Image (tube, rainbow, N blue to C red):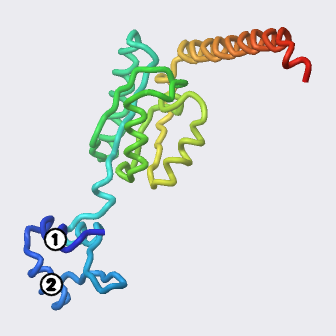
Amino acid sequence: MLKPSEMAELLGVTVRTLQTWDRRGKLIAHRTPSNRRYYTQEQYLSYIGKSDENLRKQIAYARVSNVGQKDDLANQEAFLRQYVNGKGIILDEFISDIGSGLNYKRKKWNKLLDEVMKGEVDTIYVTYKDRFVRFGFDWFEQFCSKFDTKLEVLNNPKTSPEKELVEDLISIIHVFSCRIYGLRKYKKKIEGDKGVNSL
């Protein structure tokens, strides 16, 4: 919702001009229950000849697990740019990320998801599902669709190295083994606590 003063500032006119346009049917204001004028973002975009769709971003996203895989990152970028250029798509942003696909705290990735939630992203292009996230891709795809963002996967198997998958599996095993060890330690503490055992 835009106040008349805000709409006037966006269009570079006075509030009085907006009132005149409203009376003449050139740019009709909406009315609140108390009969105050207001405008919408859609009205503004329509008046200047734009739409929400052509303001939303086209973003390519590439990721590798570590700095030693920069060649793979470059391959992903080349493949993505070749694809979008062939489709006549102009990218608004290209995101190159370094971090495990199991890490949900990647700054660039989280910033991208924030933009999705704000409705600023039309399409995200990735070479392969695991470049975006190692597990749970379908959930994230559905999440993005709730904000009218499409996750387009190009399925280039060369950009999904098996070595990286092995590293991620090892890290999962490591996390779970640490948790099991922690639970055993906790169990021993409980067994040694007379107060707990007397309950």
Left or right: residue 43 compared with residue 133: left
Does residue 153 sit above or below 26 in this rendering?
Answer: above
Regarding mark 2 in the picture, which secondary structure is present there?
helix
Q: Nearer the viewer, residue 116 or 7?
A: 7
State which quadrant residue 175 falls in: top right
Left or right: residue 16 compared with residue 148: left
Label at residue 5:
1
Residue 101 % position (x, y): 51, 25
Amino acid type of disc 2? Gln
Number of numbered discs present? Answer: 2
State which quadrant residue 45 falls in: bottom left
Give the CA distance from mark 1 to mark 2: 11 Å
Camera sees residue 48: no
**Residue for point 36% across, 15% down:** 70
Label 1 or label 2, whichever comes before in sequence order: 1
State the quadrant of the C terminus.
top right
**Residue for point 20% across, 88% down:** 25
Does residue 22 sit above or below 169 in this rendering?
Answer: below
Camera sees residue 12: yes
Q: Which residue is mark 2?
A: 19
